[in-house]
Amino acid sequence: MKHSKVLIIGSGPAGYTAAIYTARAMLKPMMVQGTQPGGQLTITTDVENYPGFGDVIQGPWLMEQMQQQAKSVGTDIITDMIKSVDFGQRPFTAVGESGETYTADSVISTGAQARWLGIDSEKKFNGYGVSACATCDGFFFKDKTVLVVGGGNSAVEEALYLTNIASKVYLVHRRDSLRAEKILQDRLFSNPKVEVIWNSQIEEVIGNDDPLNVTGVKLKNTKDDFGLGTATVDVDGVFIAIGHDPATQIFKGQIEMDDENYIITRPDSTETNIPGVYAAGDVKDKTYRQAVTAAGMGCMAALEAEKYLAAKESLMKILGINCMNHDASMSVVDYSSGIGEVLWAAHAERYSKVKMIITLIGQ
Ligand code: NAP
């Protein structure tokens, strides 16, 4: 079992920033990185909009730098994937796929994972011609024909990246306009290797069974109200770039989420409905979803966790309770703001004292 004052789940810009701030606050954070250390930026290429760099930088390089910085200020970086959490008791508990149990006085959750179309043939050819990462798998399609699905920044960036490798790149989008930034759209439309197929969805990925490989896709026109038919396009590879979903499955039933499974936080804050648990970046943000905004939220979460832990520690000191004795009978409804109620089952006689101290801390 490993314990820390702060457990950070996920390792994108939000996670690393939270790690840098909490480590510099001497909270000795531990970060469980997840299956994709560095997060989504590790599967992108050029980053032109992260401030501080005069030249275009690469996403994987930026994440390496963040990791190095988090490590050098004292973050315990752990290669594992959290598969379950228990926020119903204190300290909070998280169990990794490695079998290790992590306990912490506060938790900062971050992250998102690639969205898939959800059709059977996509699953069948995943890793055999179907991919969600052009920078990882594009190499296999030298001078071949590939197809990218999606209309956002990711899809356009993937398509542009693939033009450096493949001989032809189709971009298939379900509507008749892209949501990608104008500068990316201009680059896409002026690239002679790219052909955009509008108003279309993949109905099926077609290929061989032995060996497994992709030979084409069956496309359905999204404006074909009469279901008149489909078109087949010959391609060697299919790249799915249709966005990301918040990585919140492990929090279901434990933290308040909206109907799209984004964690709900207080306005202008990363506080969740559970005192001591914070959400930063793509687990809670469906509006901005940028590396720089995620980093900003990571910083907010760290500062809020620090304030919460300091309040908790002074409270325990005043009450003469050993901070390391994580008494599960304590349930704090609102710790950090200092205006909430404290329920202290095992120390009921001190309840009025606790309330008074909480009020003092809040002032
Ligand atoms: P996104 O902006 O959410 O775009 C997803 C695209 O996939 C949309 O065009 C959407 O179509 C389409 N789509 C979604 N579900 C689909 C489905 N089931 N079938 C077919 N198409 C589907 O996602 P993203 O491109 O990954 O970008 C995510 C965020 O990261 C954005 O905020 C973006 O700005 C940011 N980002 C920034 C950079 C950068 O600044 N360098 C790079 C990459 C990403 P509709 O348009 O019809 O909804």
Image (cartoon, helix red, strand yellow):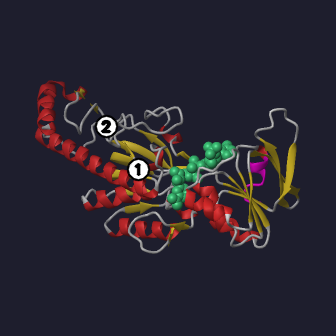
Rendered-image quadrant of the C terminus: top left
145 lies above or below 318: below
On screen, residue 171 above or below 353: below
The residue at which mark 1 appears reads as 102
Badge 1 amino acid: Tyr
How far apart marks 1 and 2 lie (CA) works out to 18 Å
Quarter of the rendering containing residue 338 = top left
Residue plotted at (17% across, 41% down): 316
Seen as rendered, the residue at the extreme bottom is 55
Q: Which residues are magenta?
A: 121-129
Q: Please say if the residues under marks 1 and 2 sit with CB atoms less than 8 Å apart.
A: no
Marked residue nearer the N-terminal end (1 or 2): 1
Position of 333 compared to 94: left or right? left
- Residue highlighted by disc 2: 275
Residue 197 spot, x, y in % from top left: 76, 52
Pointer 1 local density, CA inside 10 Å: few below 14, some 14–19, many at least 20: many
Using a 10 Å C-alpha cutoff, classify the residue at mark 2 as few (fewer than 14 neighbours), some (14 to 19) or many (20 or more).
some
Report the side of 165 relative to 59 (left or right): right
Q: In the image, which is nearer the foreground, mark 1 or mark 2?
A: 2
Q: Is residue 54 above or below residue 107?
A: below
Q: Is mark 1 within 8 Å of ligand 1?
A: no
**What's under tag 2, amino acid-wise?**
Pro
At x 21%, y 42%, the residue is 312
Residue 41's label in the rendered image is none
